[in-house]
Image (tube, rainbow, N blue to C red):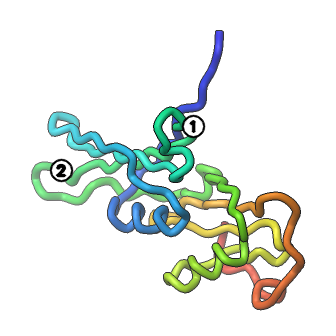
Amino acid sequence: MSTYYLHTMIRVTDPDATIRSFELLGLKEVRRMESEAGRFTLIFLASEEDAKIGNRRAEVELTYNWPAEDGSESEAYSGGRNFGHLAYRVDNIYDMCARLRDAGVTINRPPRDGNMAFVKTPDGISIELLQAGEPLAPAEPWASMSNTGSW
């Protein structure tokens, strides 16, 4: 018996905002499925490397439950921290954190150690960023930044 990792699913309230946040990390939409009967949309994202034909290894599935037919809002989701986190290896953690910060993303746990940082999606899902290879030497402004909020 073998097991093969397929994807991680997170529920989202604003698919467009969540897709934009993952695009900043280098993920792209690879497929989408909508269910009129079930009133939901599934959006699968992967890194460019993972999205190559025959190399789809890890995906994030965004599940958007449509508002009720009577027009009432869809369920509010909380407890993103309870989910745990998604983790991505990046080539340069300082460059990635600067890119995210410049786009208005809060760096909840800055990469003070040149190795690890945390940010959140618009729905509060924690994302861990890990430096590829050896940690980078501590550098400002990151080395002296405090944590912001929870991560």
Placement of 113 over or under 80, stated as above or below: below
Q: Quadrant of residue 91?
A: bottom right
Name the residue type under label 2.
Answer: Ala
Relative height, residue 129 to residue 51 (above, below): below
SS under mark 2: loop
Residue 59 relative to residue 4: left or right:
left
Between the residue at mark 1 and the residue at mark 2, the CA separation in whole angstroms equals: 34 Å
The image shows residue 65 at horizontal and vertical percentages of 29, 48
Residue drawn at (66%, 54%) of the image: 87
* Three-letter amino acid code of the residue under disc 1: Arg
Where is residue 105 drawn, in percent x and y?
A: 54, 78
Q: Is residue 128 above or below residue 94?
A: above
Give the number of the disc on residue 57: 1
- Which disc, if any, is residue 74? none
Residue drawn 55% across the image and 57% down it: 80
Residue at figure coordinates x 56%, y 49% from the top left: 49
Q: Looking at this rendering, what residue extends furthest in the top direction?
A: 1
Q: Residue furthest front?
A: 53
Q: In this picture, is 5 found above or below 15? A: above
Of the residues under marks 1 and 2, which one precedes in the sequence? 1
Residue 3 at x, y percent in the picture = 63, 20
Observer-nearest residue: 36 or 115? 115
Could you tell whether 61 is left or right of 146 in the image? left
Q: For residue 117, what is the image quadrant?
A: bottom right
Q: Is residue 1 left or right of residue 47?
A: right
In the depicted view, which residue is nearer to us: 32 or 81? 32
Query: Mark 2 = which residue?
Result: 68
Within 10 Å of disc 1 (Cα), the crowding (few <14, some 14-19, many 20+) is some
Q: Label 1, secondary structure: give it.
A: loop
- How many residues crowd around disc 2 within 10 Å: few (fewer than 14), some, or many (20 or more)? few
Q: Quadrant of the C terminus?
A: bottom right
Residue 13 pos. (x, y %): 35, 59
